[in-house]
Amino acid sequence: MVIRISKIVLLLIIALNLAIVALNNILDYNSNYEFVKNILNMSTTFPDNNLMWRKIESPFMWNLFYIVIIVCEILIAALCFAGSASLFKSLKKSDIEFNKAKKFGIIGLVFSLILYGFAFITIGGEWFLMWQSTKWNGELPALKMFILSGIILLFMNQKDS
């Protein structure tokens, strides 16, 4: 029972975290909009690098990217909340039913890995050279969420028997 409760609690941590992040991004839109704008515009990359052709200078695209990120955060939070609720409902059920109840949580965690591993670390970090910026580098926070989501996904995928 302790392992099952632990899985619910850890999934709730991701759900709550992403819900707060999304809420913050909505209520204080401009703070992280500046982050997205500067990453996509490559404003603080090394001077005269040969990859500046990748930069995006369109405010429409900056907003689009940012809104997609916020929607992804909301989606991940919703999936992880739904997964937690499903696991809670199956808490005292059979091992097979509890394992089936992991579906939404697992999907949410995989989306979290995609958001932080692909969107932030790969696209932001490498394509838009975020790693070169001392001011607008979000790779470490993204890596933290990637690792946390990955560890919880591994734990979640352990069969309950």
Image (spheres, helix red, strand yellow):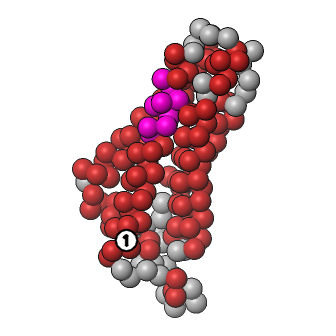
Question: Which residue is denoted by mark 1 in the rendering?
Answer: 62
Residue 2 x %, y %:
61, 13
Q: Where is residue 42 in the image (x, y as percent from the top left)?
A: 45, 78
Q: Is residue 50 above or below residue 117?
A: below
- From the image, give the main secondary structure of the stretch colored magenta: helix
> In the rendered image, which quarter contains the N terminus?
top right
In this view, the residue farthest toward the left is 27
* Range covered by the magenta-colored residues: 77-85
- Percent across and percent down for residue 33 are 33, 64
Asked whether residue 84 is drawn in magenta, I would say: yes
Seen at 36% across and 41% down, the residue is 20
Q: In this view, does 82 lie above or below 95?
A: below
| Residue depicted at x 33% and y 74% | 60
36 lies above or below 25: below
Return the x and y of residue 97 as percentages of the image width and height: 65, 18
Residue 140 covered by magenta stretch:
no
Q: Which amino acid does label 1 sit on?
A: Trp
The quarter of the picture where residue 61 lies is bottom left
**Could you tell me which secondary element the residue under label 1 belongs to?**
helix
Q: Is residue 142 above or below residue 1?
A: below
Based on the displayed image, in which of its 4 quarters is residue 41 positioned? bottom left
